[in-house]
Image (cartoon, rainbow, N blue to C red):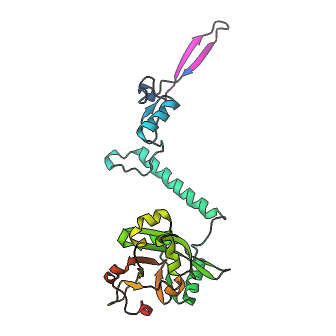
Amino acid sequence: MERLVVSDGAAAGGGDTRHTVSPKRKMAFNGCEACGLSEAKYRCPRCLRYSCSLQCVKRHKMDSSCNGIRDKTEFVTIGKFNEMHLLSDYRFLEDAGRLVDCAARDRLLPRQTSNKFLNFMKNRARKHSIDLKILPIGFAKRKMNSTYFHKKEQRFYWHVKFQFPQSEAEYTEKGVPDNKSLHKILERYIDPTESDPVIRQRLQIYVSSPGVKVFMVLDQQKLGLGRYVELDLQKSLLDNLHNKTVIEFPTLCVVLKDFAGDFATCGQASIC
């Protein structure tokens, strides 16, 4: 920014007193878009609206539902892309790299995604005749999976995804112990008295139904076999996963008995 130097003759001593005067900021030529009375002093990083005071800033955020945070991922066409956008993208990548580096240095964060931990999980699952497969880093199922093996209890705590097709509902439950029966697990969803009231309202057709069947969605299919395998409600989750392939975590489909015929199942659960 250019500066103007103004020289004044001193009243005594004959010296010059020089004053540096900054020209008026360009923003000052714009009026406040909130009150329309004063010159603008601030500009919103997100919507680029001009404001003159803190009160007007708050007013514009309330009127336009603006949070005042710059949208770092906003789409910009090639024709409008300039050096400022390039600098913004560069800073965004720097911030992302800084966050990754901080997370890598934080010793308090769990390291459950290490190869050592994952191999330990796979070996433990193999001892229970479960073929546990782990996806590469970056896959959605790998990111959301929270399954872990409790060494002291010698037990898996599974990440389980439930699908209720007749109600078009889907729920995810974390930390499901492997010794818990499917019937007991489903009480939280479809039991007339024990289920969560909000979930019960959405799954009303299941709650009032005389019975349900549970199918496990097969991630790996063999030629000539169905996409689902039926599970036993009275058996534990561990027993139901016996001799099955699980990619990251099991997905269980809960259906009404009247619709069970629509699900193509394996002829023999042991080969699924």
Q: Is residue 198 left or right of residue 176?
A: left
Range covered by the magenta-colored residues: 1-19
Q: Is residue 138 visible?
A: no
Q: Residue at x 49, y 52 (%)?
A: 92
Q: Is residue 42 magenta?
A: no
Report whether 190 appears left or right of 79: right
Q: Position of residue 127 (x, y in %)?
A: 57, 89
- Whether residue 162 is situated above or below residue 86 in the rendered picture: below
Q: Position of residue 216 (x, y in %)?
A: 43, 81
- Work out whether residue 257 or residue 28 is closer to the camera in this orientation and state it: 257
In the rendered image, the vertical position of residue 14 relative to residue 53, given as above or below: above
Which of the two residues, 125 or 89, is positioned nearer the viewer here? 125
Work out whether residue 187 or residue 193 is closer to the camera in this orientation and state it: 193
- Residue at 54% x, 84% y is 238
Which image quarter is the C terminus in? bottom left
Tell me residue 268's x, y (percent). Answer: 40, 93
